[in-house]
Image (cartoon, rainbow, N blue to C red):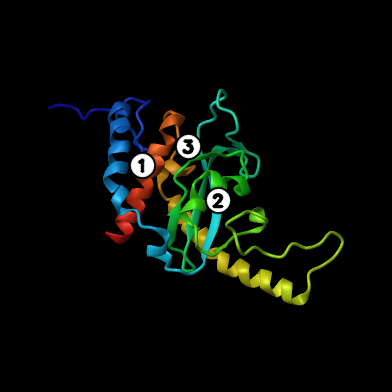
């Protein structure tokens, strides 16, 4: 009786984090991304003309010493800044298609990831990290140094924080994909393949949600 094949230790599935043939997965990633690209809706097809919620998350990666700017001081580990837009009920409306090094702040990553262009024409709400960012129209009031917010401003901030919880739920759903999570063992394939992987995962998310 033939014994089941035991995968080599360096073989990792592009999505589940389990072991797989690396050459095969290098071929699968772009093929899946290309096949599912038509399944990715425009943000207005998900959110209509309503306000969308924007936030970023750091998806952990292996710490390649030769690749600068991956380490995120905010997250405390190396990774990629992925920008996400969600509806008010927590559905993913768009994912920035371009991976941004984790050291870059959300204010930079919003445009650099391509999410700003995807959301053109939409009202977008975000946290204080996006203050003054073109394309973000609603942010909380910032407490002035040595001062305090007016009652109406504090009430607005509280209401906005409750609404913005929906984008945190959307990001939590995104990171159930093991290649974007700590549980998946951090992304280890060549970083040059990251955009292919992100496109494939984006296509799979929307395909499973709407097809």
Indicate which disc, 2 or 3, sits on the residue closer to the N terminus: 2
Percent coordinates x, y for residue 74 in the rendering = 65, 44
Image quadrant in which the C terminus is located: bottom left
Q: Quadrant of the N terminus?
A: top left
Identify which residue, 37 or 18, lies in the foreground: 37
Foreground mark, 2 or 1? 2
- Disc 2 crowd, CA 10 A, few/some/many (<14, 14-19, 20+): many
* Mark 1 secondary-structure assignment: loop
Residue 20 shows in this picture: no
Q: Relative to 154, is 208 on the left or the right?
A: left
- Residue drawn at 38 percent across, 37 percent down: 196
Mark carried by residue 56: 2
x 44%, y 55%: residue: 94
Residue at figure coordinates x 26%, y 44% from the top left: 35
* Label 1: how many Cα within 10 Å (few below 14, some 14–19, many 20+): some
Q: Secondary structure at mark 3?
A: loop
Q: Which residue lies most toward the left here? A: 1
Residue at 54 percent across and 58 percent down: it is 54
Task: Bin the neighbour count of mark 3 within 10 Å (Cα to Cα): few under 14, some 14-19, many 20 and up.
Answer: some
Front residue (pair 48, 93):
48
The residue carrying mark 1 is: 16
Q: 160 above or below 129? A: below
Q: Position of residue 204 (x, y in %)?
A: 33, 50
Q: Residue furthest top?
A: 66
Q: Is residue 200 above or below residue 47?
A: above
Q: Are marks 2 and 3 in contact (CB under 8 Å)?
A: no
Q: Nearer the viewer, residue 117 or 12?
A: 117
Question: Measured from the top left, where is residue 161 in percent x and y?
Answer: 62, 66
Q: What number is the disc on residue 186?
A: 3
Q: CA distance from mark 2 to mark 1?
A: 22 Å
Instruction: Indicate whether 99 appears above or below 118.
Output: above
Alpha carbons under labels 3 and 1: distance apart = 11 Å
């Amino acid at each position: 009786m033939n014994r089941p094949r035991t995968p080599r230790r360096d073989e990792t599935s592009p999505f589940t984090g389990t072991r797989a043939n690396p050459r095969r997965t290098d071929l699968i990633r772009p093929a899946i991304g290309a096949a599912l690209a038509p399944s990715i809706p425009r943000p207005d097809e998900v959110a209509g003309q309503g306000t969308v919620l924007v936030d970023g998350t750091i998806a952990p990666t292996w710490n390649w010493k030769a690749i600068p700017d991956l380490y995120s001081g905010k997250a405390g580990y190396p990774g990629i800044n992925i920008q996400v837009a969600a509806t008010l009920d927590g559905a993913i409306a768009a994912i920035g298609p371009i991976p941004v090094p984790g050291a870059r702040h959300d204010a930079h990553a919003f445009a650099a990831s391509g999410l700003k262009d995807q959301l053109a024409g939409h009202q977008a709400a975000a946290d204080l990290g996006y203050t003054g960012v073109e394309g973000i129209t609603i942010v909380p009031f910032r407490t002035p140094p040595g001062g305090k917010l007016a009652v109406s401003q504090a009430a607005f901030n509280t209401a906005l924080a409750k609404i913005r919880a929906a984008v945190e739920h959307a990001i939590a759903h995104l990171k159930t994909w093991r290649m974007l999570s700590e549980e998946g063992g951090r992304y280890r394939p060549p970083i040059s393949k990251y955009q292919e992987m992100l496109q494939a995962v984006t296509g799979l998310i929307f395909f499973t949600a709407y097809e």
